[in-house]
Amino acid sequence: MPNTVMLWGNRWWLPHRSSPVVFADLSAAADALAAAWSGDDRTIRLVFQPNALESTLVSCPHGNRATLTLALAEQHPALGDPRRAWSHEPILPAGDGFTTLLHYETEPGLFDLIARLQERGFILTAVWPMVTWLNALPTDLAESGSTTIAAIADDRVCLYCDSIDGSRGAFIWNDPQRLQRLEAFIKQRVETDRGSRVLLVIADETILPSIASLPCSDRVQILALVDALHSLASLPVRHPAQLLAVPARWTAPRVMVAASVALLLASTALGARLAYDYSVMRADATALQRQTQALRTEVARLGANAAEIADLRATLATAQPTPPVTAFARKLSATIPSEIVLRSLRLTPESFTGTGWISPRASPATGQGWTARLGAKPWQLSGPFEADSTGAFRLTGSWR
């Protein structure tokens, strides 16, 4: 886990020192840190709050850094100045629009500081505004009301606040009235919101007497700044408030490596495809040879059976046609009246014979009409329809 160090005003606050490291100006800050650093591990994440870093609440569109630059650079020129660092908190809805906390340098400083720190062996993993870091501190503050988190040194105050309605604010007071401003702010918060809680991060114990008069001390928690630097404030590297430029996912060397890998994979795939196609072609050629041999064998066998085939064709040519049994049965079922019951039907290759009864109540024309409807098809009836006194009849005919 990288060490968390804080640059606040003209002082360094380190996790392994109770007293700050003072430097004259920002150009001397890297040397001061290197001289005070103990240990070989110089991997750090930086909480950055010099005098030239502002944090302010702004209305904004909902978009990325480019969108914010277009919308806010006229009012906040730092957004369009590549020499100055800036970032913002997550954009949240507010009424009919959106707001964010904007952090920006009023004069260049961070990028030169990073270069000097790297020259002295420090590796920076992240750079956060102090307001962002205060908001990320793990606390036991209740989530049922507003939250106020303030860092207090002997000559300055940095404050972050939010409310249950989603509103946020940030204040940086470096003037002689800073403690009076803080007291008035906290008093107003606790009076308007009974669930409001306060966390005060104090630089050293000498500050305690100056904050003893703060209202509602039962709602106030106090945390030493050195202990806060040891806390596991959870901030993802790609948080929008990150002031350190996040390395691009795709740099020129990465693109070249990716292109080389893609070309290698494509070449491998093409070679594999060609090898597969060649193996398939060989398999197809082998299968074709086998089929050719099988066809030659079959042709020879068919040639040997030519006489047998000729005899079979002659037999088929002289064979008697099959009686139209199916057509005759369909015709019978389609034309037989409801007054007639067919008892039996006997079919031979040459003729057919049927027996049955006709209802006594049927008219004489019923049977004659039925045989007429049977028609003269590939069959022929032997005579007209006749039934005896009991209604029994016999129907005979032959195939044509």
Image (cartoon, helix red, strand yellow):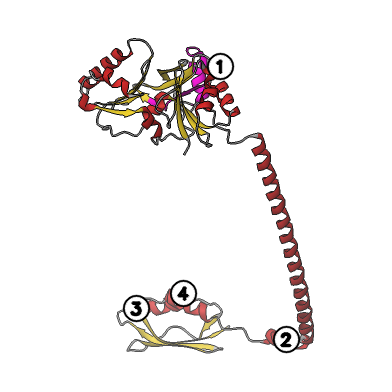
Marks 3, 1: nearer the viewer? 1
Marks 1, 2: nearer the viewer? 1
Q: Position of residue 261 (x, y in %)?
A: 67, 46
Q: Which of the marked residues, 1 or 2, is nearer the chain's N terminus? A: 1
Q: Which of the marked residues, 4 or 1, is nearer the chain's N terminus? A: 1
User: Which segment is the magenta one?
Assistant: 64-92
Hey, what amino acid is under mark 2?
Answer: Ala
Residue 339: numbered disc:
3
Q: Position of residue 11 (x, y in %)?
A: 45, 20
Q: Which residue is mark 2?
A: 314
Marks 4, 2: nearer the viewer? 2
Of residue 86 and residue 197, the one placed in the foreground of this image is 197
The residue sitting at 56% across, 79% down in the picture is: 378
Q: CA distance from mark 2 to mark 3?
A: 48 Å
Marks 2, 3: nearer the viewer? 2
Q: Which residue is mark 4?
A: 373
Of residue 6 and residue 321, the one placed in the foreground of this image is 6
Q: Which of the marked residues, 4 or 2, is nearer the chain's N terminus? A: 2
Question: Does the magenta-highlighted stretch encompass residue 343?
Answer: no
Q: Which residue is mark 1?
A: 81
